[in-house]
């Protein structure tokens, strides 16, 4: 034993240790072979020692060679993380009171180690955690079983205490946005070894030692690669507006959106509880070259998740976020908010950014606050009448023969001044207040007129209950018919003439600007009203 063991022990002293902050590079196959060689020599030496009957008992052998033996095994293995479960501890407020954050972790890991020859356990430890060379906290672990070596799967449980919030927020951004990133772990730990007579439950061929040993001062230094969420792919459902009881006209409405999230990261996030989210327009669309956090446009809604919200790995179930429209009373903000509603009403997806405002859990609030995620709000579905028009029908008070004669008479000009009644619908699930309307009338792609409803105060506004269909205005409003495209205008007049002279109805498009109030906001809705039916009032059955 003397020569072989002495060579093994001497070689074992060369196993490198890593101090905090030093880079931990993945060994190449060649360097790994060089590092394993001393271990193999040590194991050969240990085997020779066991074969000599006159030598000390196995417990003495373990104590004599324990630390370099164990240090070599701990230094050589790579630790792979399969899953990290985060959940709130029984109490975290004592840490929060002194500016620190605490959360419980359960880490599923797998690794391949050389054989210990005994059952090994990594004792409770205080492990420093570093991100790109900067320390952000301490993981206080409970004992972690290592088996007898070989390929193993195990769990490391403990509590993460964050005391460097600025660095912690950097790693939180990496979790949200990056494909993968590396975290460094460093500690000086104790490894406990148990032989067959001290509770080792391994197979006999893996546990040939007796006695027990507690090996302190073992350097534990690892780099682990973790998967990021790559922006958490967010899918949004349809926007819903629901009236709330209010003491004033056109008060706030509840905004509700269903969403689901795909989480490809290493993290399973439990006990997120209530997340507060501000929804912004995307100021960089359509290029999206800037990160989402640098592209926040106008905030138009504030929403929250339901209490008890959690986020597992993979694709989540649909969940609801609810809140209120929240638009500053500035023209620019109102126009941008109107753009969102215009896209929505014309069944086009709208690019938005969800920015995390905070969480009811201090740990997640510090981690996620300010994180911004891109998503698309889908357009409104055509559930009623095949369109999302607000103006659906027009009844013109007009004598067709007189109008045609007037248009063909060069002395009477090229403009007809008439009146019409309009039937309005409400495509929203909340009360819509129409305070004014201007619209260009288009027929077969040509400009043929202009409609104008006067500006009304909120008290005078036309009130359309949720999902109202075909509300007829009690008053007539002016319409101008322009002969700049005379053939098109004459065709329009021919079509609205009663049968058999005409068709009795024509269909026009309105390039409309509708001054409205809905959900507590006052957007100007600018979108085309398609296939609006136009008829003569006197032949429509209206009084």
Image (cartoon, grey):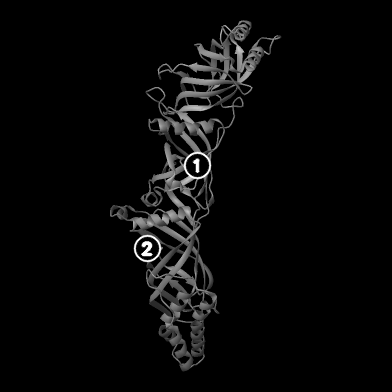
Seen from the viewer's position, the closer of residues 396 and 185 is: 396
Q: Is residue 101 rendered to the left or right of residue 528?
A: left
Residue 105 at x, y = what percent? 43, 59
Quick check: can you spot residue 138? no
Q: Which dot marks residue 164?
A: none
Q: Is residue 474 rendered to the left or right of residue 361?
A: right
Determine which residue is flagged by label 1: 285
State which quadrant residue 243 falls in. top left
Q: Secondary structure at mark 1?
A: loop
Seen from the viewer's position, the closer of residues 234 and 111 is: 234
Q: Secondary structure at mark 2?
A: strand
Residue at 32 percent of width and 56 percent of height: 100
Disc 2 + disc 1, Cβ < 8 Å: no
Quick check: can you spot residue 184? yes
Q: Quadrant of the C terminus?
A: top right
Q: Which dot marks residue 134?
A: 2
Sort mark 2 into few (<14), some (14-19) or many (20+) by Cα contacts within 10 Å.
some
Residue 113 at x, y = what percent? 51, 74
What's the CA distance linking mark 2 and mark 1? 35 Å
Q: Is residue 184 rendered to the left or right of residue 428?
A: left
Sort mark 1 into few (<14), some (14-19) or many (20+) by Cα contacts within 10 Å.
some
Which label's residue is closer to the chain start, 2 or 1? 2
Residue 535 at x, y = what percent? 61, 13
Residue at 66 percent of width and 14 percent of height: 495
Seen from the viewer's position, the closer of residues 96 and 537 is: 537
Is residue 366 placed above or below 285 in the rendered structure? below
Residue 281 at x, y = what percent? 46, 39
Q: Of discs 2 and 1, which sits in the foreground?
A: 1
Residue at 42 percent of width and 66 percent of height: 184
Is residue 295 placed above or below 532 in the rendered structure? below
Which residue is situated farthest in the right direction here?
A: 500
Which residue is situated farthest in the left direction here?
A: 98
């Amino acid at each position: 034993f003397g020569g072989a063991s002495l060579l093994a022990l001497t070689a074992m002293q060369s196993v490198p240790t890593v101090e905090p902050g030093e880079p931990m590079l993945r060994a190449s196959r060649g360097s790994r072979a060089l590092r394993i060689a001393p271990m193999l020599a040590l194991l050969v030496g240990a085997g020779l020692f066991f074969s000599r009957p006159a030598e000390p008992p196995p417990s003495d052998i373990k104590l004599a060679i324990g630390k370099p033996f164990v240090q070599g095994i701990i230094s050589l293995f790579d630790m792979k993380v399969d899953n990290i479960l985060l959940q709130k501890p029984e109490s975290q407020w004592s840490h929060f009171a002194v500016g620190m954050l605490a959360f419980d972790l359960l880490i599923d890991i797998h690794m391949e180690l050389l054989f210990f020859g005994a059952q090994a356990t990594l004792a409770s430890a205080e492990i420093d955690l570093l991100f790109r060379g900067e320390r952000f906290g301490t993981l206080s672990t409970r004992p972690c079983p290592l088996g007898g070596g070989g390929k193993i799967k195990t769990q490391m449980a403990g509590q993460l205490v964050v005391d460097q919030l600025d660095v912690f927020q950097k790693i939180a951004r990496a979790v949200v946005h990056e494909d993968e990133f590396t975290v460094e772990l460093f500690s000086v730990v104790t490894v406990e070894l148990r032989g067959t007579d001290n509770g080792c439950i391994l197979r006999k061929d893996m546990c040939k030692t007796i006695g027990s040993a507690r090996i302190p001062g073992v350097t534990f230094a690892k780099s682990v690669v973790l998967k990021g969420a790559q922006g958490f792919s967010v899918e949004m459902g349809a926007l819903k507006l629901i009236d709330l009881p209010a003491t004033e006209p056109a008060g706030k409405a509840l905004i509700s959106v269903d969403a689901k999230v795909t989480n490809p990261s290493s993290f399973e996030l439990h006990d997120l509880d209530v997340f507060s989210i501000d929804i912004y327009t995307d100021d960089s669309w359509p290029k999206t070259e800037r990160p989402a956090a640098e592209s926040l446009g106008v905030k138009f809604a504030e929403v929250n998740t339901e209490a008890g919200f959690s986020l597992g790995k993979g694709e989540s179930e649909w969940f609801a976020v609810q809140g209120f429209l929240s638009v500053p009373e500035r023209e620019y903000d109102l126009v941008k908010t109107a753009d969102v509603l215009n896209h929505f009403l014309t069944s086009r997806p709208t690019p938005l950014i969800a920015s995390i405002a905070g969480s009811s859990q201090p740990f997640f609030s510090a981690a996620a606050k300010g994180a911004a995620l891109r998503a698309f709000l889908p357009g409104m579905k055509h559930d009623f009448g095949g369109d999302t028009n607000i103006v659906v029908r027009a009844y013109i008070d007009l004598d067709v023969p007189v109008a045609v004669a007037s248009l063909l008479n060069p002395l009477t000009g090229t403009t007809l001044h008439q009146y019409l009644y309009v039937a309005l619908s409400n495509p929203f699930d909340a009360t819509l207040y129409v305070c004014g309307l201007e619209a260009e009338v288009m027929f077969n792609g040509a400009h043929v007129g202009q409609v104008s409803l006067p500006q009304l105060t909120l008290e005078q506004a036309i009130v359309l209950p949720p999902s109202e269909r075909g509300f007829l205005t009690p008053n007539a409003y002016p319409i101008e018919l322009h002969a700049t495209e005379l053939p098109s205008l004459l065709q329009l007049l021919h079509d609205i003439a009663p049968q058999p002279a005409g068709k009795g109805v024509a269909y026009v498009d309105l390039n409309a600007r509708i001054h409205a109030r809905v959900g507590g906001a006052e957007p100007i809705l600018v979108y085309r009203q398609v296939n609006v039916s136009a008829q003569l009032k006197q032949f429509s059955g209206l009084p």
